Image (cartoon, helix red, strand yellow):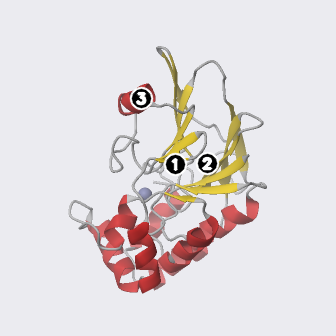
Amino acid sequence: MRALILSDIHGNLEALDAVLAAAPQHDAVWNLGDVVGYGASPNETVECMRLLADFNVRGNHDKVCCGLVSAEGYNPAAQRAVQWTTERLTDRSVRWLESLQEGPLFTSNSSLAHGSPMDEDRYILNIQDAWEPLQRAEQRTSFFGHTHMQGGFQLRGSEWVHVKPVQSEGVDADKRSQWVLPLREDGTRYLLNPGSVGQPRDGDWRAAYAVLDEEANEVTFYREPYDLALAQGRILMAGLPERLALRLREGR
Ligand code: ZN
């Protein structure tokens, strides 16, 4: 079984299209949330996940943009993006976003969350944040998103590893690249983030995603270049904040 794992698409259809065209053959699609917010194509990315994904976890932007909770506490650019998105979502998109379930969701062998498995809105940024979820994990692999940073943590006993995929092509590369994490069968538990498809914040502008291969016992982290200028142009033409276009190039 091979699962294509996507997170934080954020209405960036150009990035999502590039990832779907490049992804290796897979049996399932797992979406870790934030399908909308920031990008210029919220209805298109909703429709794509509605049709393609076997599991859809709700993200904080999904909740806010369909009106389940307020955007209080968001920075001004994010609030404007929420307002812009809310005004443009079709009724069908709103209903689908409203129907999304809070993580963690459970596949046969993994758990899927947007933020922490303990709290959907909490960020997992360091070992301290990863501690309790990994102590409590019953599956070998738990996947999360929300931070927009590819990688994660692994734990066996008291031995911690900060998993940082090193993409050989470098951050300015315009080529695709991949990095393989072999999964150990000695009781090691993994808490892993595929990275953000639509708005990476780990210094690499390329769309991020991951594939879990249960037979090969490995997770492969990918970076895929996409038509950045088109995604930026559509954000600017839509009247969304300029910063949301500029940050795509910075990967921040
Ligand atoms: Zn997000």
Residue at (39, 66) in percent of width and height: 62
Amino acid type of the residue tagged 1 in the rendering? Gly
Q: Quadrant of the C terminus?
A: bottom left
Image: 215 above or below 69: above
Residue in front for this viewpoint, 207 or 5? 5
Name which of mark 3 and mark 2 comes first in the sequence.
Answer: 3
Dot 1 surroundings within 10 Å: few (below 14), some, or many (20 or more)? Answer: some
User: What percent of the width, then of the height, locates residue 13?
Assistant: 58, 72
Picture quarter containing residue 73?
bottom left
Q: Nearer the viewer, mark 3 or mark 2?
A: 3
Name which of mark 2 and mark 1 comes first in the sequence.
Answer: 2
Provide the residue designation for mark 3. 136
Residue lying farthest to the front in this orientation:
108
Residue in front for this viewpoint, 241 or 102? 102
User: What percent of the width, then of the height, locates residue 243?
Assistant: 39, 68
Provide the residue designation for mark 1. 203
Instruction: Verify CB contact (< 8 Å) between mark 2 and mark 1.
Output: yes
Report the Cα–Cα distance between label 3 and label 2: 35 Å
Q: How many numbered marks does the figure carry?
A: 3
Picture quarter containing residue 15?
bottom right
Amino acid type of the residue tagged 3 in the rendering? Arg
Q: Nearer the viewer, mark 3 or mark 1?
A: 3
User: What percent of the width, then of the height, locates residue 119?
Assistant: 33, 45
Name which of mark 3 and mark 1 comes first in the sequence.
Answer: 3
Residue 171 bears which disc, if any? 2
Please state if 45 lies on the left or on the right of 24 as rendered. left
Residue lying farthest to the left in this orientation:
72
Mark 2 lies on a secondary structure that is loop
Residue at (37, 29) in percent of width and height: 132
Report the Cα–Cα distance between label 3 and label 1: 31 Å
